[in-house]
């Protein structure tokens, strides 16, 4: 059976000064699914190597990953999501979250925008009949 989430895309950049294995391990722990990322080698402004890493997760694995993220969200982030879910949605009801990469590698899930790990959640459109806010409240927080 397919879950309520169509897909999750997780992406981030690995800079030359960072350990890619440490970041990949932290992201794998966060998602709690066995997914292999795509990697794209880029070059920074001064010629420094940068790697863009992107995970595409679908089906039940996407629902598992979102549940894992939801259970680890800190209380202030949960409160912000519940009060203003619209701030996190695009015109297609996709949910966008950004987490601080440096906090994640030490085991903490915190919002962040400087050098984030980006998470894009795409719902199954036919399940949005009561609106995106109610859908995500149910999926993320059990409808509380």
Image (tube, rainbow, N blue to C red):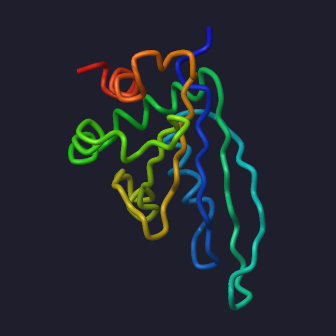
Q: Residue at x 33, y 26 (%)?
A: 137
Q: Position of residue 15 (x, y in %)?
A: 61, 74
Residue 40 or 128: which is nearer the viewer? Answer: 128
Q: Nearer the viewer, residue 42 or 87?
A: 87
Where 78 falls versus 52 (above or below)?
above
Q: Quadrant of residue 42?
A: bottom right
Rendered view: 6 above or below 97: above
Residue situated in front as seen by the camera: 6 or 51: 6
103 left or right, relative to 78: right
In the rendered image, the quadrant that contains the C terminus is top left
Where is the N terminus found, in terms of image quarters? Answer: top right
Q: Quadrant of residue 18?
A: bottom right
Q: Position of residue 120 (x, y in %)?
A: 54, 43
Q: Position of residue 24 (x, y in %)?
A: 59, 54
> As drawn, which residue projects farthest toward the right?
41
Q: Which residue of the protein is positioned furthest toward the top in this rendering? A: 1
Q: Give me the residue at 68% from left, 87% from top.
A: 45
Residue 61 is drawn in which quadrant?
A: top right
**Residue 45 vertical placement versus 60 (above, below):** below
Q: Residue 97, percent across and down?
A: 44, 48
Which one is in front, 74 or 89?
A: 89
Name which residue lies at 26% across and 36% down. Answer: 82
Q: Left or right of 14: which side holds 114?
A: left
The furthest residue to the front: 91
Total numbered labels placed on residues in the image? 0
């Amino acid at each position: 059976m397919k879950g309520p989430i169509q897909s999750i895309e997780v992406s981030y950049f690995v800079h030359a000064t960072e350990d890619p294995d440490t970041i990949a391990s932290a992201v794998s722990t966060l998602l709690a699914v066995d997914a292999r990322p795509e990697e794209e080698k880029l070059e920074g402004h001064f010629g420094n190597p940068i790697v863009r890493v992107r995970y595409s997760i679908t089906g039940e694995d996407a629902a598992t990953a979102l549940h894992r993220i939801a259970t680890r969200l800190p209380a202030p982030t949960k409160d912000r999501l519940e009060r203003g879910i619209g701030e996190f949605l695009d015109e297609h009801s996709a949910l966008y979250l950004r987490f601080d990469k440096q906090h994640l590698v030490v085991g903490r899930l915190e919002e962040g925008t400087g050098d984030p790990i980006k998470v894009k959640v795409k719902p199954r459109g036919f399940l949005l009949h009561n609106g995106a806010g109610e859908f995500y409240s149910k999926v993320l927080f059990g409808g509380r």
